[in-house]
Image (tube, grey):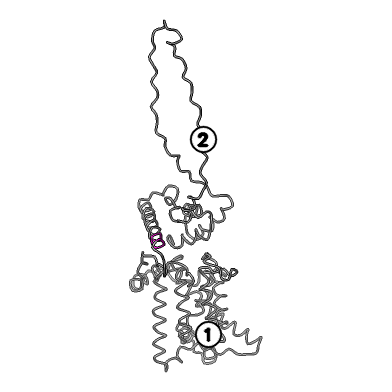
């Protein structure tokens, strides 16, 4: 199974969980009561000719096809990483803004299609499909891809491949789904790029967000993910033991990191010993060639004392040797990131991470942007 983005579960994503439960539940109810399906069809002809404006709301919320509901729910579940990254209020503002924009773009594209091919589009697929397709725009531009495996040695499988495959599968469900998808992508690009300052016109007010957080968040807040890592079938005891050791290291260092933040003291050199997060790099250091040992210098000949040179001279007090200091380990030097990695650090900082965390993650991952961003999103996102 392809690796999805973000940690498992719906923790810190109450809006995504509410959409999954409410919309899927209403679809099941309409499946059991098919006599009411005509009230939730997205009919452009009924809106324009019969002035049934209420269909712009009812026809663009609930999916009438179980296949569309399944694919739409799977996309919302994977897009929960955007809610965790940007916050529930900004995520809700994006959905609301693109929901309004797609209503306008749907009519515009249908008229363009009628003008080019002389075919009138009378009905479009129902459901919250336009805003979901618009989420592909910030997902593509904001979430980095991490290579997972190679298929046939040519096709690279990443953590985002499953999301794109589900989107392509949703396109095949109905003949005019491509028009809804194109409308969603155009609306998502307009809202994400803040064209004509649309983000200042279409947004969720702060007071409404507070009311929703107070009333709905206790109902739809998901439990935190389990601490036990999933073990593959047939895993040996050594693999299980190594996974538990890596998890223990992560828990200890994350606890130290949160303790430093609670004390309002910035951790020295970023997160303490980031190399412990990456066991592959830790074991890689054991294969390095041994450092050259300095050649021992020949023993020094003792100098004759003044008493031996002049026997008649009065004896002198022997000088006391200075106390020997025990050798201390050289201080850890925080090696600066190379100049060519400045742009990479800036990209991580644009995602919301601090400069110290970004530099430490790149340094510990051997300047691998994919490994560093994947870890930051998994544990500090």
For the record, the magenta segment spans 238-243
Q: Which residue is mark 1?
A: 173
Is 288 magenta? The answer is no
Residue 235 image point, x, y percent: 41, 66
Q: Residues within 10 Å of mark 1 (few under 14, many from 20)?
A: some
User: Image quarter for residue 122?
Assistant: bottom right
Residue 187 image point, x, y percent: 55, 75
Residue 68 image point, x, y percent: 48, 83
Q: Is residue 341 left or right of residue 320?
A: right
Closest to the observer: 56 or 270? 270
The quadrant of the picture occupied by the C terminus is bottom left
Q: Residue furthest top?
A: 312
Residue at point 55% right, 66% down? Answer: 141
Closest to the observer: 357 or 133? 357
Query: Could you tell me how far apart the alpha carbons at marks 1 and 2 are, in whole angstroms?
Result: 73 Å
Closest to the observer: 308 or 219? 308
């Amino acid at each position: 199974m392809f690796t999805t983005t973000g940690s498992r579960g719906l923790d810190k994503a109450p809006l995504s969980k509410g959409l999954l439960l409410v919309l899927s539940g209403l679809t099941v109810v309409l499946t059991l009561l098919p006599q009411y399906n005509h009230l939730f069809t997205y009919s452009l002809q009924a809106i324009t000719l019969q002035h049934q404006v209420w269909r712009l709301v009812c026809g663009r919320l609930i999916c009438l096809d179980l296949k569309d509901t399944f694919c739409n729910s799977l996309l919302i579940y994977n897009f929960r990483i955007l809610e965790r990254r940007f916050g529930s209020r900004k995520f809700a503002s994006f959905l609301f803004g693109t929901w309004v924009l797609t209503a306008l773009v749907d009519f515009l594209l249908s008229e363009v299609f009628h003008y080019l091919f002389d075919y009138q589009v009378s009905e479009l697929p129902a459901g919250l499909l336009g805003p979901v397709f618009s989420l592909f725009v910030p997902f593509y531009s904001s979430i980095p891809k991490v290579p997972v495996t190679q298929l046939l040695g040519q096709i690279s499988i990443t953590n985002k491949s499953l999301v794109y495959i589900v989107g392509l599968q949703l396109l095949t469900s109905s003949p005019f789904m491509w028009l809804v998808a194109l409308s969603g992508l155009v609306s998502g690009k307009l809202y994400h790029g803040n064209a004509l300052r649309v983000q200042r016109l279409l947004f969720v007010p702060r007071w409404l967000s507070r009311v929703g957080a107070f009333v709905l968040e206790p109902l739809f807040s998901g439990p935190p993910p389990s601490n036990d890592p999933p073990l593959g079938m047939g895993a040996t005891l050594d693999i299980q033991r190594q996974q538990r050791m890596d998890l223990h290291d992560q828990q200890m260092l994350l606890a130290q990191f949160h303790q430093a933040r609670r004390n309002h003291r910035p951790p020295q050199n970023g997160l303490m010993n980031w190399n412990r997060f990456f066991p592959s790099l830790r074991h890689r250091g054991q294969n390095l060639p041994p450092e050259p040992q300095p050649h021992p210098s020949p023993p020094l000949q003792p100098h004759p004392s003044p008493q031996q040179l002049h026997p008649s001279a009065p004896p002198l007090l022997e000088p006391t040797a200075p106390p020997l200091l025990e050798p201390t380990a050289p201080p850890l030097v925080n090696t600066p990131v190379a100049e060519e990695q400045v742009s990479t650090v800036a990209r991580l900082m644009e995602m919301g991470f601090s400069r110290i965390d970004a530099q430490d993650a790149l340094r510990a991952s051997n300047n691998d942007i994919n490994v560093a961003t994947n870890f930051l999103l998994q544990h500090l996102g």
